[in-house]
Amino acid sequence: MSTHRPTRRPARRRSRLRAALLLPLLAVIALLAGCASHSDNPAPATSGSSGAAAAPAFPVTLTVPGGAPLTLNAQPQHIVSLSPTSTETLFALGAGKQVVAVDDQSSYPAEAPKTKLSALNPNAEAIAGYKPDLVVASGDTGKLTENLSKVHIPVLVLAAPNTLQDALDQMTLLGKATGHTQEATKLVTDTQGRIKSIVDGTTKPATPLSFYYELDQTFYSVTSKTFIGQVFAQFGMTNIADKAPEAGGYPQLSAEAVSAANPDLVFLADTKCCGQNAQVVAKRPGWSKLKAVRNGNVVELDDDIASRWGPRLVDLVQAVGTAVDKAAKQETR
């Protein structure tokens, strides 16, 4: 299988990959930036906002793999989130009332106080303007942590996970950081249970199905070494990107390589960013003959859900499970 690396990629997709997957191939997500107007009415929590039997215990010390311990002396009440995944998790934990601002890529939930803060162009002064007592981000470019530490603002950096367990551990950590440990425990347990139920309920074909996962229309993909790749591996599938020479985590394939592999399923994680869909894919030279195209197994994923590792991870697993179940049943006919 041939691979090549172009000198440039579509700017819009490049931002999405950095902000969402933190591809080691591209760059770790940067953090804040841009001045934005303060939301006077922080969004309410969407779940788990009541029922805590006791006041949260602080101070707490948070330990992030590869990072220095972070101690919070009191429960944060003015959180700025520069990570779409963390934004979703904070609201799912019932910490929405504690969030005063989120970055421009945090599109869910709708009530999140979205601003012009950018995770790609760090601007510590703009973030400090929200007077946060905790900033949550997916990376530390632009010396964000160092700059905010000068004004005594703690930064919790939660990078893209390598495994499903890493993603669940981040939910637990955010619960501890915000004083919602019970809610975090419930969220993790529910997420694990729902994923197991989906995987166990999916038809298992006699021969493993092969798949191609598309990050953008220049054929960047993911291998089984990545978090997304491990999600797919739960269904016993064969990832065609694993055969790419020096694949690493995010190889760039070619149209010819995908055609030669002739995957059973194609998953498109570039529907919003890049306008890709089953009809567009079918018009690519030679792709109309692909097994996935002929059998109607080109799956159009929601870019946001496919690139985040928070509570909506279950939705991604469900989409994959539904597609695998359909393809597996076709094999038995």
Image: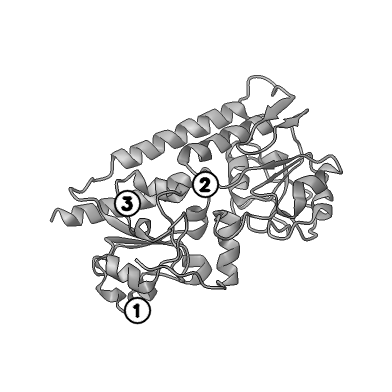
| Residue nearest the observer in this picture, 314 or 309 | 309
Query: Image quadrant for the C terminus?
Result: bottom left
Which residue is under mark 3?
322
Residue 209 position within the rendered picture, expressed as x and y whole percent measured from the top left = 26, 54
What residue type is disc 2 on? Trp
Within 10 Å of disc 2 (Cα), the crowding (few <14, some 14-19, many 20+) is: many
Distance (Cα) linking label 3 and label 2: 19 Å
Give me the disc on residue 283.
1
Q: Quadrant of the N terminus?
A: bottom left
Q: Which mark is residue 309?
A: 2
Q: Earlier in the sequence, mark 3 or mark 1?
A: 1
The answer to whether mark 3 and mark 2 are in CB contact below 8 A is no
Left or right: residue 149 versus residue 28 is right
Q: How is the image coloured?
A: one colour
Kindly identify the amino acid type of the residue bearing the numbered disc 3. Thr
Determine whether 104 is above or below 187 in the image: below
**Residues at marks 2 and 1 touching, judged by CB atoms closer than 8 Å:** no
Q: Amino acid at mark 1?
A: Lys
In this rendering, which labeled residue sits more in front, label 3 or label 1? 1
How far across and how far down the image is residue 138, in percent?
64, 48
Q: Would you say the residues marked 3 and 1 are in contact, meaning their CB atoms lie under 8 Å apart?
A: no
Q: Position of residue 323 (x, y in %)?
A: 31, 55
Residue 153, given in percent of the width and then of the height, sits at: 81, 41
Measure the C-alpha gap from mark 3 to mark 1. Answer: 25 Å
Q: Residues within 10 Å of mark 1 (few under 14, many from 20)?
A: few
Q: Secondary structure at mark 3?
A: helix
* Residue 137 seen in the current view: yes
As measured in the structure, the alpha-carbon distance from the residue carrying label 2 to the one carrying label 1 is 32 Å
Residue displayed at 19% across by 57% down: 330
Q: Give the residue at x 77% y 40%.
A: 78
Residue 130 visible to an observer of this rendering:
no
Q: Nearer the viewer, mark 3 or mark 2?
A: 2
